[in-house]
Image (cartoon, grey):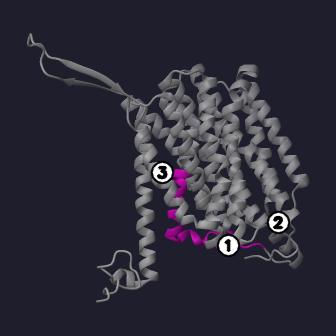
C-alpha cells in the first residue's frame, strides 16, 4: 500500500465528498434516457428492441471507457481526469437537444455515455486516500452516487413536463459543467501523484497496470459485477417502461416507482461497504445472490389465467373453474425495493475485493470489473427488448436475470470451495465429516 503519512481526516472527507457528489451528477446524466427515452420512443415510433438499444448505448461508452480511464487515473490522478471527463460529456449532452433522427440519437448517446466512466475515476482516486481497513466503507459511500439514477427517475419526468426533453438535456449539461469546475477548484492531488512529483518517479506504465488482468479471479469479480451493477443500470433504465407497459401507469408515476428501486440500490452501497469491512465481502455476496434468486423467482411468474375442469354439471356440461394469478403493482414495487437493496450491498462487496487483492492496480483491475459490469447495463436492455419482441411476455426479463444470478452463485461457490481445499488440503481428503471439526465427538463416559 502507498504511504498515507500527512493525509488528514479533512483531506479524506474532502476527497470522498467531492468524488461522491461528482459521481452522483454523472450517474444522473448517464441514466437520462430512462426518462427522456420514453418520449423519444413515442416521437420516433421505436420498437422495443430499438428503444432498448437507445437506452443501452450510453452504457456502452461508459463501460468501455472505464478500462482506459482507470489506467489514466492511476497515472495522472483523479483531480485532472474527473473534471476533464465531465466537460467532454457536457458537450454531448448539450448537443443532444438538437438531434432529430434515431441514428444521430445513437451517436449522441455514445458521447453522453462517457459520464459512466466517472465511476472508475472516483474509485481509483478515493482508494488512495484511505487505508485498506477503511476502503470498503469509503468506496461504499462513494458508490452511493448511484443515487443519481433515482434523482433522474424522480426529477426528470417533471423537468420534461416543464421544459420538454430538449430543455431537460440542456439543464443536465449546465449542471455537469458547474460540477466539473467545483471539483477542479476544491479537490486536492492524491497522495501517490503528489509523491511521484516530489520524488521524480514516473507513473507505472499502462502495460504493467494491465498485468493482473490475466488472472481468472479478476474476471470472476467482473461476472459478479455484471449482475449487481449491470443489472442495476438495466433495471433503472427499463423499469419506467415496464411500469407504463405492464401496469398502465403514467410516466410520472413510473418514474417514482422506478426511483423507489434505484434509491435503495444506491444509498445502501455505503452499508454494503461497512458490512464488507466487518463481516467480509464473501458473506455479503452470498446474501446478495441468495436473496436475489428468491425475489427474481417471484418476479418471473407471468400474469396467468388458469381454467380447471371440475366435476361435470348435472346436465353433463363441463364445469369450468377460472381464476387468474399475477403480481399486483404494490407487491412488485416492494420486491423491486428488496432487490435494489441487496444489489447495492453486492456492488460494494465486489469493490471491497479489488484494493485488497490488487492495491497497486486499482485503476486497471477496477476498470476491467467496471467495464464488464457496465457492459451488463448495455447488453441487458437490448436483451430485454429482444425478449419482449419475441415472446410478448413481460416477465421473461426477470427469468433471464434469474438465470444470470444462478450462474454467478454457482461459479462463486465452486471457486470458494476450490480455494478452501487448496489452502486446507485436509478438507479435500475428509469424506465422512461434512463440517470438518477437529474430530468426531468423543465416546460417552460409561
- Rate crowding at label 2 as few (under 14), some (14 to 19) or many (20 or more) other CA atoms within 10 Å: many
User: In the rendered view of the protein, which quadrant contains the C terminus?
Assistant: bottom left
Is 77 in front, or is 126? 126
User: In the rendered view of the protein, which quadrant contains the N terminus?
Assistant: bottom right
Q: Disc count in the image?
A: 3
Residue 235 location (% of width, % of height): 55, 40
| Magenta region, residue range | 203-228
Would residue 305 be counted in the magenta stretch?
A: no
Residue 169 location (% of width, % of height): 74, 31
Tell me the distance, in whole angstroms, between the alpha carbons under discs 3 and 1.
30 Å
**Residues at discs 3 and 1 in contact (Cβ within 8 Å):** no
Which residue appears farthest toward the right when viewing the image? 185
- Looking at the image, tell me whether mark 2 or mark 3 is earlier in sequence order: 2
Which residue appears farthest toward the bottom when viewing the image? 446
The label shown at residue 359 is 1
Q: Secondary structure at mark 3?
A: helix
Q: Main secondary structure of the magenta part?
A: helix
Which residue appears farthest toward the top when viewing the image? 315
**Residues at discs 1 and 2 in contact (Cβ within 8 Å):** no
Q: Secondary structure at mark 2?
A: loop
Q: Disc 3 marks which residue?
A: 291
Looking at the image, residue 114 sits to the left or right of residue 283; the answer is right
State whether residue 317 is above or below residue 200. Answer: above
Residue at (58%, 61%) from the top-left corner? 350
Q: Disc 2 marks which residue?
A: 190
Residue 442 location (% of width, % of height): 34, 86
Amino acid at each position: 500500500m502507498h504511504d498515507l503519512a500527512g493525509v488528514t481526516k479533512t483531506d479524506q472527507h474532502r476527497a470522498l465528498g467531492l468524488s461522491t457528489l461528482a459521481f452522483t451528477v454523472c450517474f444522473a446524466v448517464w441514466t437520462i434516457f430512462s426518462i427522456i427515452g420514453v418520449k423519444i420512443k413515442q416521437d420516433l415510433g421505436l420498437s422495443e428492441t430499438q428503444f432498448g438499444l437507445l437506452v443501452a448505448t450510453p452504457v456502452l461508452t461508459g463501460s468501455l471507457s472505464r478500462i482506459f480511464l482507470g489506467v489514466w487515473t492511476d497515472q495522472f490522478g483523479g483531480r485532472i481526469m474527473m473534471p476533464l471527463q465531465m466537460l467532454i460529456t457536457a458537450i454531448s449532452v448539450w448537443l443532444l437537444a438538437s438531434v432529430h433522427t434515431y441514428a444521430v440519437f445513437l451517436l449522441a448517446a455514445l458521447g453522453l455515455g462517457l459520464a459512466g466512466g466517472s465511476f472508475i475515476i472516483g474509485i481509483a482516486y478515493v482508494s488512495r486516500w484511505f487505508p485498506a481497513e477503511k476502503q470498503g466503507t469509503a468506496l461504499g459511500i462513494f458508490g452511493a452516487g448511484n443515487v443519481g439514477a433515482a434523482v433522474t427517475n424522480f426529477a426528470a419526468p417533471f423537468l420534461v413536463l416543464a421544459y420538454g426533453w430538449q430543455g431537460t438535456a440542456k439543464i443536465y449539461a449546465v449542471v455537469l459543467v458547474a460540477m466539473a469546475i467545483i471539483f477542479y477548484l476544491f479537490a486536492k492531488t492524491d497522495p501517490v501523484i503528489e509523491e511521484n512529483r516530489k520524488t521524480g518517479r514516473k507513473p507505472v506504465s499502462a502495460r504493467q497496470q494491465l498485468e493482473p488482468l490475466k488472472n481468472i479471479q479478476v474476471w470472476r469479480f467482473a461476472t459478479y459485477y455484471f449482475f449487481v451493477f449491470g443489472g442495476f443500470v438495466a433495471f433503472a433504465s427499463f423499469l419506467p417502461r415496464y411500469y407504463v407497459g405492464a401496469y398502465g401507469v403514467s410516466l410520472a408515476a413510473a418514474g417514482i416507482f422506478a426511483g423507489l428501486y434505484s434509491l435503495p440500490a444506491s444509498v445502501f452501497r455505503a452499508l454494503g461497504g461497512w458490512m464488507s469491512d466487518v463481516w467480509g465481502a464473501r458473506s455479503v455476496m452470498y446474501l446478495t445472490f441468495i436473496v436475489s434468486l428468491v425475489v427474481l423467482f417471484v418476479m418471473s411468474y407471468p400474469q396467468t389465467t388458469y381454467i380447471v375442469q371440475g366435476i361435470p354439471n348435472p346436465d353433463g356440461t363441463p364445469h369450468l373453474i377460472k381464476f387468474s394469478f399475477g403480481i399486483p403493482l404494490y407487491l412488485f414495487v416492494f420486491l423491486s425495493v428488496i432487490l435494489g437493496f441487496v444489489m447495492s450491498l453486492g456492488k460494494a462487496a465486489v469493490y471491497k475485493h479489488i484494493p485488497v487483492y490488487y492495491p497497486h492496480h486499482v485503476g486497471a483491475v477496477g476498470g476491467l470489473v467496471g467495464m464488464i459490469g457496465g457492459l451488463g447495463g448495455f447488453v441487458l436492455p437490448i436483451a430485454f427488448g429482444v425478449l419482449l419482441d419475441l415472446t410478448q411476455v413481460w416477465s421473461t426479463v426477470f427469468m433471464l436475470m434469474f438465470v444470470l444470478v444462478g450462474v454467478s452463485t454457482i461459479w462463486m461457490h465452486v471457486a470458494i470451495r476450490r480455494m478452501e481445499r487448496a489452502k486446507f488440503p485436509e478438507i479435500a481428503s475428509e469424506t465422512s465429516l461434512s463440517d470438518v471439526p477437529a474430530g468426531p465427538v468423543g465416546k460417552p463416559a460409561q
